[in-house]
Image (cartoon, rainbow, N blue to C red):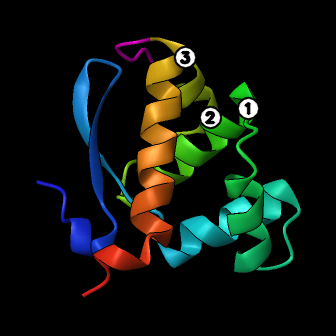
Amino acid sequence: MPNKYRGEIGAELGGRHRTLVLTLGALAELESAFGAGDLMALAERFGSGRVSSRDLIRIIGAGLRGAGEAVSDDDVAVMTVEGGAAGFVRIAAGLISATFDESVAP
């Protein structure tokens, strides 16, 4: 069961319930992928409200790997989710919110 105090979320991806979390390593992976110099730049990018399909794949893939799953971005790209593209957006938004929302911090 996901622990919201650790920034974990649960999602149904590819027909399985999975846990996602943006660990420090996963955030470093995203900084590199997006060319963000630091966490503030990464948070600003996420806060812009603009996201591509490739962005969703990278964010969700990093979240799955952060939770210990051995998946590639190519694996994530072929996963299905209820609601299609909007479902992927909801998962990525929930993961980002769980990571950066200060009101959840213990």
Q: Main secondary structure of the magenta part?
A: loop
Give yes or no for contact between labels 1 and 3 (Cβ–Cβ under 8 Å): no
Q: CA distance from mark 1 to mark 3?
A: 12 Å
Left/right placement of residue 78 relative to residue 28 reads left
* Numbered label attached to residue 79: none
Residue neighbourhood size for the residue with mark 3, other residues' Cα within 10 Å, grouped as few (<14), some (14–19), many (≥20): few
Amino acid type assigned to the residue bearing label 3 in the image = Ala
Q: CA distance from mark 1 to mark 2?
A: 5 Å
* Numbered label attached to residue 54: 1
Amino acid type assigned to the residue bearing label 1 in the image = Arg
The residue located at (18%, 57%) in the rendering is 2
Q: CA distance from mark 3 to mark 2?
A: 11 Å
Which one is nearer the viewer's eye here, 100 or 54? 100
Q: Position of residue 71 (x, y in %)?
A: 48, 40
The mark closer to the camera, 3 or 2, is: 3
Residue neighbourhood size for the residue with mark 2, other residues' Cα within 10 Å, grouped as few (<14), some (14–19), many (≥20): many
Q: Position of residue 97 (x, y in %)?
A: 45, 58
Task: Find residue 1 and report its image quarter.
Answer: bottom left
Q: Is residue 81 magenta?
A: yes
Residue that badge 3 annotates: 85
Range covered by the magenta-colored residues: 79-83
Secondary element under disc 1, as helix, strand or loop, is helix
The residue located at (41%, 48%) in the rendering is 94
Which one is nearer the viewer's eye here, 40 or 31? 40
Q: Is the residue 49 above or below the residue 35 in the image?
A: above
